[in-house]
Amino acid sequence: MRAMNMKKAISNTQLLLATVVTVALLLTPAAFAAAPGITGPTFNLTAQQAFISQPDGNFVYSWGYGCVSASAPSGFAPTLTGQKCPTMQVPGPTLIVTQGQTVTVNLTNNLPNAAGNTSILFPGFNVTATGGIAGLLTKEAGHALATSTVTYTFVASTPGTRAYYSGTQGDLQVEMGLYGAIIVLPSAVPASCNAGVHASNVTAQGSSSLAHPGVTEHDFRLAHAAYNHPGACYDREYLFQYSEMDPRIHRQAEEQAGRTCPAGAANTGCMEVATEPYVPAYFMINGRSMPDLMDPNYAPEYPHQPYNGNPHMHPGELTLLRIIGTGRWQHPFHEHGNHVRILARDGNLIQSTTDPANNLAGPLLFTTTTTPGLAMDGIYYWTGKGLNWDAYGHNPSSSDPNATLSCTPDANGYNTGAPTAINYFEWCQDHNKPLQAAPFGDVAGGGPATLPDPNIFANGPWFGGSPYLGPNATVRAVGSTGTTPPSGTVANSPTDEAGFAFMWHSHNEREITTNNIFPGGMLMMMLVDSREFVIDESK
Ligand SMILES: [Cu+2]
């Protein structure tokens, strides 16, 4: 599937939200999170049942980790004002700690008695388990009340993103939703990571945002680097956990959840659920499927699926992707728009053997194929390099000041000299290079393409939108001759921002369905907006 230049239909919603939040910010403490979670180093977790929502209207009986209701979450990072850590969520709460901390996780088993014992594995750490009952892989929280709590303790010895998941009846319990992520922030961040695109974003947007004058873009990062290495600096971050569900397994578990096991029942409880044959119908990112994953984090309609999948960035930003495969299948996930440079796998930074202090050696991946239990950290960025047209629709002979911006290439060919410029990080080789043979407005003409006339209903409404970034390039490409703006801008004022949307999705096309209906499943839209558009991750 390709989605080169679709008009960003959701942009308007985000604009409205940003406006609302601007007002709210005056009244409440800041609330920002792109990879939200709870901060430790002590976590009181519970495992229990609830129903999670899918876009076909199905509510799927599931098991998940959550925060023990009696203990307030130790904190959200970054702060999400007014949000609660649910007692059950899929994926489980993202545990955020700092390298060197001693982490304590107290797990209470509140699953139905018939489900048996449960536990958590923290692969990559030397875990000491106390209390509970001896199990196959670790100590377990029993399904009888007297033995329902177990404690795991370990030192967060190395930074990075890792999976955690049930070590008890993994074929059933991981399928049912007992998995999550732990993020260890580096204890030392290289000084060079405190500069860069993000630092200039914050500076630039405090005063110059055209879409939202006076609105400052905030810092949504958990840290300035993923690892203690200058090659691991980043400007923005997202966590994506990939999984799938076979609703037949969940239905069988639901039907047997009311059983009471006889005294002395085995650790595995007294359910009889066949985990083969395996026929998943739901393919999820962070527990949600397309289009639900585009809704905000902690949207009230998903009380047990608080995390979304809605990446958004400015040109040139180094975006850290924290990727975990948590299901039973591999998922060949493709991030359109660029490749992903892998930094690390399972928290192991991939360094050059010849100059490890300065150089990383991770592969550049077209498809970040997830493997069950495997975590990856990678850097993605988007610029207009290679488009072969001026993505901002500049025209040196225009009278519009936005059309006559300059582009001064830095050593890499990008316009980075003026952090406040709308065309910050423009690829200067294509500056003033026209796309359209005969545009309607004042963007430069004479290019190789003829785009559909948005004023002709037979063609225009089928055209996804603008091939331009920036606050008014879309309307300049239409001009004043017509009364109907390009289709995507019916909902989104063409005089406001236009961005690019790139489809990020599984390249196993079965997995971009929800219960056999396309589109759905493991599919999300990555949005690129020019830098004067304020990206607000607090929703
Ligand atoms: Cu694709």
Image (cartoon, rainbow, N blue to C red):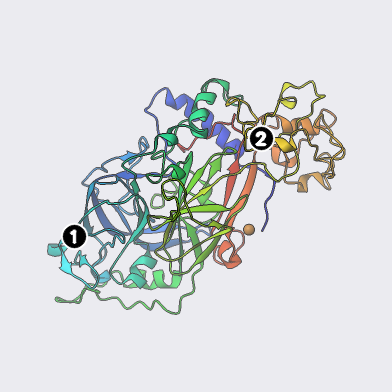
Q: Where in the figure is residue 533, as x and y percent of width and height?
A: 58, 31
Residue 521 at least partly seen: no
Q: Is residue 430 visible?
A: yes
Q: As shown in the figure, which amino acid type bears the numbered disc 1? A: Thr
Q: Are marks 1 and 2 in contact (CB under 8 Å)?
A: no
In front here: 345 or 75? 345
Quadrant of the image occupied by residue 286 = bottom left
Q: CA distance from mark 1 to mark 2?
A: 52 Å
Q: Is residue 474 left or right of residue 445?
A: left
Between 274 and 204, the residue placed more toward the observer is: 204
Counting residues from the N terminus, which is met first, the one under dot 1 or under dot 2?
A: 1
Residue picked out by circle 2: 426
Q: Residue sitting at 58 percent across and 47 percent down?
A: 526
Vertical placement of residue 421 versus 390, above or below: above
User: Where residue 355 sits in the image (x, y, percent)?
Assistant: 44, 50
For mark 1, what is the residue? 128
Left or right position of 421 against 185: right
Q: Quadrant of ligand 1?
A: bottom right
Residue at coordinates 27% horizontally, 43% vertically from top-left? 73
Residue 20 pos. (x, y %): 50, 29
Q: Amino acid at mark 2?
A: Glu
Comparing marks 1 and 2, which lies closer to the viewer?
Answer: 2
Residue 131 in the image, given as x and y percentages of width and height: 13, 61
